[in-house]
Image (cartoon, helix red, strand yellow):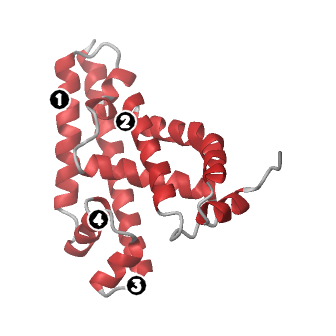
Amino acid sequence: MEVFNDDELLRQIKTGSSDAFSEIYNKYWDKTFMQAYDRLKDIKQSQDLTQDIFIRLWERRTSLDIQNLPAYLNTAVRNNVFKLVASHKVNEDCYNIAERLLPHSSSADHQLITDELIKAFHSLVDNMPPQRKKIFQLRYEQDLKTGVIAQQLNITQKTVQNHLLSSYRDIRFLLAQLLSMFIFLFQFSYF
């Protein structure tokens, strides 16, 4: 049996080769699933997200220009997780940080943390500068590519990417602050 590298498999997929697609699927499904699970902490959602990524890869096979398949799959996981968060479809387990970090907290504590994280995320998005908010929503609520967003807003693709990077940094910073605060509060509430 001949072994092909990713570039050759992607070329074959563009021509409709289901064998090449199966080889990529078998080679990368587990890794893609684990990347999704690391972010979501939910088996079913991680499986669904992974399946969706591979379905889209097949459906868009003729139009995709993938230079690095592992990087493409990693980016697809990250973007799909953001879309789940933005559309409120993430299971509570994704936000159930107290369960992993604070084993003695109650379900009321879990619900409080979940509610606060969701509220803070939506507040962050609502308070983004208007253009950044618009770009974020077009990307994660309407699933538009950065090039399409750039054309719609009559700006460069690099500007769109910079706004999205700023959004990611803001979200990471917000989550880090909230987690630190919750850990601090729960540490003192159990003494």
CA separation in Å, label 1 and label 3: 41 Å
Query: Mark 1–mark 3 contact, CB under 8 Å?
Result: no
Mark 1 = which residue?
112
Q: In the rendered image of this protein, does residue 118 appear above or below residue 143?
A: above
Query: Mark 2–mark 4 contact, CB under 8 Å?
Result: no
Regarding residue 132, the answer to whether it shows in the image is: yes
**Mark 4 / mark 1, whichever is N-terminal:** 1
Mark 4 = which residue?
136
- Which kind of residue does numbered mark 1 sit on? Leu
Q: Is residue 190 left or right of residue 57?
A: left
Q: In the rendered image of this protein, does residue 161 appear above or below residue 17?
A: below
Q: Is residue 57 left or right of residue 151?
A: right
**Mark 4 / mark 3, whichever is N-terminal:** 4
CA separation in Å, label 4 and label 3: 15 Å
**Mark 3 / mark 2, whichever is N-terminal:** 2
Which one is in front in this view, the residue at disc 1 or the one at disc 3?
Answer: 3
CA separation in Å, label 1 and label 2: 22 Å
Q: Residues within 10 Å of mark 1 (few under 14, many from 20)?
A: some
